[in-house]
Structures are given as C-alpha cells and as structure tokens.
Image (cartoon, rainbow, N blue to C red):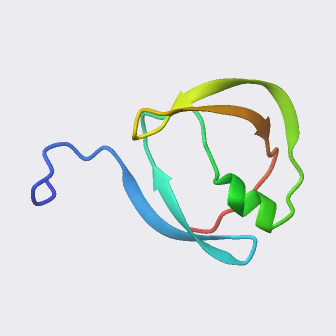
C-alpha cells in the first residue's frame, strides 16, 4: 500500500512523445486513451474525425471527443 493511498488506481510516469517529455497516466480500468489537444496542435499531428462521444473530466465538465490519432509512439 502506498502511504496514505488505500487503493492504487492510476500510475503516473514521465514519457516521451514526438521528442518531448509528456506526463503519462496509466489507469488499468480505462478503455480509451486520451491526449491533450494543445499537444496535438503544437506538433501539427494528423487526426481523423469520427462520430465521437463525450467524456467527463475530473471537474465534472463534459468534453466532446471526436478526433482520433491512429498511431502515436510513446516511450516510458
């Protein structure tokens, strides 16, 4: 058990994507992966549109997810 944490739900690591350090959060309960739109725009990455769905953020705000990146290499 981690000090002060009853259940370990998420692992946070520093990784590297597109030559830049990134925070990688691994949640074994998650069914999807997400990436910050600002990172995508800064790196001028190609995305594809799809029908999309909404996800609830940590603050309870709903966000539309309607783009996908088919491949992104991340070193941990």
On screen, residue 11 versus residue 33, left or right, reads left
- The residue positioned 36% from the left and 49% from the top of the image is 10
Where is residue 54 shown, x and y percent of the image?
A: 61, 25
Q: Is residue 9 left or right of residue 15?
A: left
How many circles with numbers are drawn on the protein? 0
Place of residue 49 in the rendered image (x, y in percent of width and height, measured from the top left) = 86, 33
Considering every residue shown, the one lying at the far left of the view is: 4
Q: What percent of the width, then of the height, locates residue 65?
A: 69, 33
Nearer-the-camera pick, 8 or 64: 64
**On screen, 7 above or below 73?**
above
Q: Nearer the viewer, residue 76 or 66?
A: 66
**Of 34 and 41, which appears nearest the observer?**
41
* Residue lying at 40% horizontally and 41% vertically, measured from the top left: 58
Q: Quarter of the image containing the C terminus?
A: bottom right
Quarter of the image holding residue 7? top left
- On the image, the x and y values in percent for residue 74 come to 66, 63
Query: In the figure, 33 relative to 66: above or below?
Result: below
Vertical order, 51 against 65 (above or below): above
Snapshot quadrant of residue 55: top right
Q: Is residue 76 above or below residue 38?
A: below
Identify which residue is drawn at 31% across, 43% down: 9
């Amino acid at each position: 058990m981690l000090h002060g944490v009853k259940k370990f739900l998420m692992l946070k690591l520093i990784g590297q994507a597109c030559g830049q350090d990134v925070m990688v959060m691994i949640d074994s309960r998650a069914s999807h992966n997400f990436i910050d739109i600002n990172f995508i725009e800064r790196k001028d990455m190609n995305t594809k549109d799809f029908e999309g769905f909404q996800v609830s953020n940590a603050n309870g705000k709903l966000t539309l997810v309607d783009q996908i990146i088919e491949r992104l290499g991340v070193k941990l």
